Image: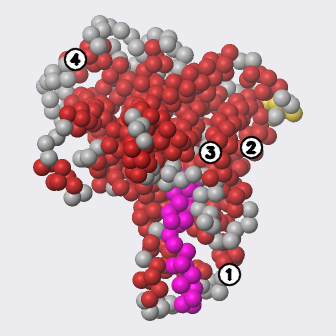
Amino acid sequence: MSTVNGTRVRRRSGGEWLHDGLLVVVFLWCLAPFVWLILTSLKQGDAALNDPDLLQGPFGLGNYVAVLAQDFALNMRNSFAVASMATLLSVSIGVMAAYALARLPVRRRIALMTGVLAASLFPPVALVPPLYEAWRTFGLLNTYEGMYLAYVSFSLPLVIFIMSTFFAAIPRELEESAKIDGASALQAFARVILPLAIPGVVSAMILTFVTAWNEYLLASTFAPRNPEIAQTVPVAIATFTGAVEYQRPIGTITAASVLVTIPMIILALLLQRRIVAGLTAGAVKG
Amino acid sequence: MSTTIRTQPPPRLRRLPGHGLTDVALARLFIAPSVLVMAAVVLFPIGFALVTSLRSYTRRQVDGFAGLANYATVLSDPAFWAAMRFTGLFTVTSVALEFVIGLAFALLMNHARRGRGMTRAVILVPWVIPTVVAGQMWAFMFNINPGFINSLLGLDDFNWLGSAGWATVTVIAADVWKTAPFAALLLLAGLQTIPAELYESARMDGAGAWQRFRHVTLPLLRPAIMVALLFRTVDAVRVYDLPQVMTGGAFGTESLSMLVRQFIVITPDPGIGAALSTITFALVLGVGVLFVSQIGRSMVEGGSTR
């Protein structure tokens, strides 16, 4: 990190200039569409919204006022509740399973890990027919439970993968010395290993939360309408209708999109290290 | 780290419940909840779909054993083959583009002297944006109104979303935009495990930039490439959100996942819907198994006793 100031002193070569220029391409790729989204969401009135010129005003916050008048705050609440529950549930039981698979004597360990891998390849759409029938029987359609229970099917394998990588990286001697000091297996896990694995737990929590927050297929099947009950943000954004039917209201949709994306981008910027660690857990092995 | 812990005085341990558990008992206790939950939300649905797909129905009521008749119905349905065609085309094209662009981004980021953290944060933006938002955003940018991409490219009123072929292009473009940075992150992690000395000695042996890439980077990056391709391919085969939001499946952009969901909502025959979802499941699993057998056992053996 201290090299930043060191290299500044040197004259920058042509190659470095070219390189920085290419990095700008990466920045534009990632950010330019989002800039389009923000500017469009701030345009007022049909004339401005239907003009391809991004700087064609007038600008204002009218679209945001309209979105919040459409119960969008309730959609945000639902998404937050469902994503939080999915995260809590899958992280709490997934961390234990990952520790057992990484460290404890488990019979059929390979078979279990293969099962986890197979489950992570599972297409969520295959859950739709059976769970739709089951949820209808149990009255779980249009409920938070109906969604976060289904989300565990893909978030639990994710948590187990990330966490078993993290546990495997913690030296075994730590448990052994805790046991020499008289700790039981459970105490060695709870007092010694788990505190060291907190960064991994944070990674797993963020990834699970983001995946659940963004989920659309199951949410639109199990809770397609009614923001006051359980409809989540992606479903709302996909189904916003304007004053005129069949005309998608570009102003409201872009404003709602910015509203849900800003917190996620802040999360990504703040917790960048943890997210990248989680995403790449497993990718660097082999 | 381990030595400092060892020399510390023993931590004072209160008795926790389950103090006397052996390692084996603890392992069972720790694994049981996950196994139960996975059985309920993964194994049960697969089994249920399998059973349903073998039954024949009249007006949503079971009226007997159908054998493989439902599968035959699905396999002779042109809509199924149209969905297969779109899903296959989408998967091959988008994964190939994402891989090439992602690798280029990863190489750039790996060589960057400045702003590494900044770039890594920025590259997370497309990944963190909900797919539905990305779909709406790209649909509006490609749409005739306001015609942003048309005006960028100097096209007049070209109807991207409303013409066969080009509608597929818009969905692929949105997917490549959203996931190429993700591929870049996975590949960057792989690049960073390659020791710099290897490049130094290759340079001393007179290897040029292309030769270093071809003979040092690519072979050593193979595991990371396989993992990135596995994740991306499996995700692409089960694509749903983008075509659903951008085109609603019109103009030849209905994916397999969209077709399955259509059947569940519209068809009065659960048997055919279940047969379709079982075929989709088998396809996705097949693609996954193909990759995993290539990666070998290394992923499964992840946190092993080494």
Instruction: Give how far apart the Cα atoms at labels 1 and 3 are.
Output: 35 Å
| Residue B190 highlighted magenta (yes or no) | no
Residue A200, image x, y percentages: 45, 62
Same chain check for tags 4 and 2: no
Report the amino acid beneath label 4.
Answer: Asp
Q: Does the magenta-highlighted stretch encompass residue A172?
A: yes
- Amino acid type at circle 2 is Phe
Image position of B236 (left or right of A18) = right
- Residue at which label 4 appears: A51
Q: Earlier in the sequence, mark 3 or mark 2?
A: 2
| Residue named by callout 1 | B22
Estimate how packed mark 3 is, as few (under 14), some (14 to 19) or many (20 or more) residues with alpha carbons within 10 Å.
Answer: some
The secondary structure type at the circle numbered 1 is: loop
Q: Main secondary structure of the magenta part?
A: helix
- Seen at 51% across and 45% down, the residue is B220
Marks 1 and 3: which is nearer the front?
3
Provide the residue designation for mark 2: B48
Residue A188 in percent (x, y) is at: 54, 80
Question: Quadrant where the C terminus of chain B lies?
Answer: bottom right
Query: SS of the residue at dot 4?
Result: loop
